Image (cartoon, rainbow, N blue to C red):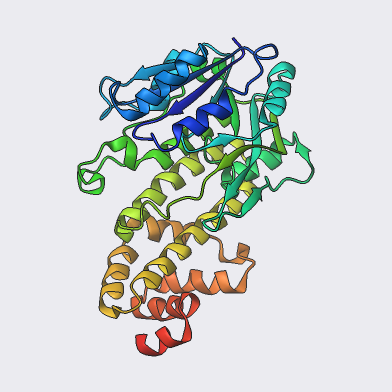
Amino acid sequence: MDLSVIIPACGMQRYIAACLRSVTRCPRQNIDMECIVVSDDGANETAAIVNRYMERDIRIKLVIMEDWETSDAHNIGIEKASGRYILFLDAADRLCEDAWEQIETAVEEEYADFVAFSHITSRNNGNLKAQMLPISDVISTDEKEARRLMYADSVLDTCAGKLFKSRIIRDNNIFFQTDLIYDPEFCKGEPLWKKSRAVAEFVFVAEYFEHSESYLLTKAMILYCPPKSGNALKNYSIKDRVDLIRILYDFHVSAVTRYNDSELMECMKMYFLTMLTDLFGEYVKERWYRRDVVDTLYERVLGNEFLKNFLNDVDEQRIRSKIKRYEYRLLRQGNAAKIRRYFAIRTGNAAKIRRYF
């Protein structure tokens, strides 16, 4: 079989029909495809919709997770997949009308181990936006460019719009980890895989990337993604968020070290510095009316051992932006009130700032 499409679909009855319609446009005469939908309950509405599509198209299969609290739908789909290539879709995603032409060519030609397409998103106002991979040409096979996008820009850190060779996945025992950020307080009693999905996706893609020997990045678009419903982690403390960044950073460092590429390492550190400064700004923006609360949040995280070690490890001379260099110095100084005032100005409007001080 050429291709296995894997769709985790727990409680996705609003979206799964449109997703399946886009998948079943796959031309039967050109590509041997199977579509594996993984759900948590064989009797719910999502399963009922999938069953109706199964009656029309024998290529669609429904797999029920027996223990959905400790399992990952992606891993179950991988176990059941028989295709040479695997394409992961969110149930809310849809393949573009000409996506199958692009996929068919990539599968038939076996261009590369790591294949990444661009995609289209829609904004809340309904307007569509092309999310092109920031590559130097329409198609790139340059390994250094792929590494930069993977580790320094984090453009390739999700499964969306990528083809994976099942042989590489199985030969190297690559799977979606369900034991990341194991912290009962952080998980709030919910299934662990729900809380760690973004991290697990990145680790999966990055591990696969390391075992790839050839790369194909293209501006051709195959995927339509609906607007995201905000930051899923915004209700968690800044300490928890920094802990998540630490997990990602440690993995990045481990991977980039193996490439022995000092320039890539420095670019990667700049990316994480931006991630951290943006995080400090986010908490001021959300709590601009509570100076004491923000100062307390900042003081707790400024003593974080990871944050201290990271800031000590950054070479200030490599920070090209004057603004970013100033923000770096602020974090190193560790004055919570001063940091709060700066990010209040950077993220707030004039009326709020006057009241804030």
Which quadrant would the N terminus be assigned to in this image?
Answer: top right
At a point 75% along the width and 18% down the height, the residue shown is: 109
In this orientation, which residue lies closer to the viewer: 109 or 314? 109
At a point 42% along the width and 62% down the height, the residue shown is: 279
Can residue 89 be seen at all in this image of the molecule?
no
Find the residue positioned furthest to the right. Answer: 137
At a point 33% along the width and 32% down the height, the residue shown is: 178
Residue 10 in the image, given as x and y percentages of width and height = 35, 32
196 over 113 or under it: above or below:
below
In this orientation, which residue lies closer to the viewer: 210 or 116? 116
Residue 83 in the image, given as x and y percentages of width and height = 56, 13
Tally the numbered discs. Answer: 0
129 over 48 or under it: above or below:
below
At a point 25% along the width and 44% down the height, the residue shown is: 187
Residue 171 in the image, given as x and y percentages of width and height = 51, 15
Q: Quadrant of residue 115?
A: top right
Residue 52 in the image, given as x and y percentages of width and height = 43, 20
Can residue 98 be seen at all in this image of the molecule?
yes
Is 300 on the left or on the right of 117, as rendered? left
Q: Quadrant of residue 321?
A: bottom right
Q: Quadrant of residue 162?
A: top right
Which quadrant would the C terminus be assigned to in this image?
Answer: bottom left
